Amino acid sequence: QVQLVESGGGLVQPGGSLRLSCTASGSIDDIYSMGWYRQAPGNERDLVAVIDSDSSTKYADSVNGRFTISRDNAKNTVYLQMNSLKPEDTAVYYCNAKRGEYIGYEVIYDYWGQGTQVTVSS
């Protein structure tokens, strides 16, 4: 019921910057948080950053101070500004959205984008 489309990945040199975008469509009114996760080969899919409905944010320690997550509610889009990129940031980055529904009790649905490749290499 929620579709997520990511863009903005690519190849960048160490120390460079990229901005990822994720646009949501469908049942977007009930989304209460959106975030970015990443997965490198042989690793688990790990949280990078998340932003909730009141614009509070959380970051993984490995990216704190270098990455910034933001939302543009008018465009139904979440961004991840990535600065001072390191080779260890290389991964597939996935957009995530959580949607809540109350049907006598709380139900939470998790949605994922298709992923966008970020490669940091000299």
Image (spheres, rainbow, N blue to C red):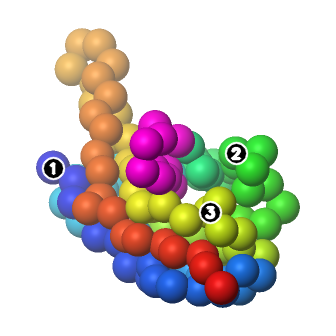
Most foreground residue, 59 or 53:
59
Front: mark 3 or 1: 3
Q: Position of residue 117 (x, y in %)?
A: 41, 71
Q: Residue at the left extreme?
A: 1
To which residue does mark 1 refer? 1
Question: Is 9 above or below relative to 51?
Answer: below
Most foreground residue, 93 or 105:
93
Mark 2: which secondary structure?
A: loop
To which residue does mark 3 refer? 89
Q: So how many labels did they put on this image?
A: 3
Mark 3: which secondary structure?
A: helix
Q: Position of residue 37 (x, y in %)?
A: 49, 50
Most foreground residue, 100 or 14:
14
Q: Residues within 10 Å of mark 1 (few under 14, many from 20)?
A: few
Residue type at tag 2: Ala
- Range of residues picked out in magenta: 36-46
Q: Is residue 86 left or right of residue 99?
A: right
Mark 1: which secondary structure?
A: loop
Q: Quadrant of the C terminus?
A: bottom right
Question: Is 66 above or below relative to 48?
Answer: below
Query: Looking at the image, which residue is at 72% across and 80% down?
Result: 14
Distance CA(mark 2)–CA(mark 3): 12 Å
Question: Is 17 above or below relative to 36?
Answer: below
Is residue 40 shown in magenta? Answer: yes
Distance CA(mark 1)–CA(mark 2): 28 Å
Q: Is residue 1 left or right of residue 21?
A: left
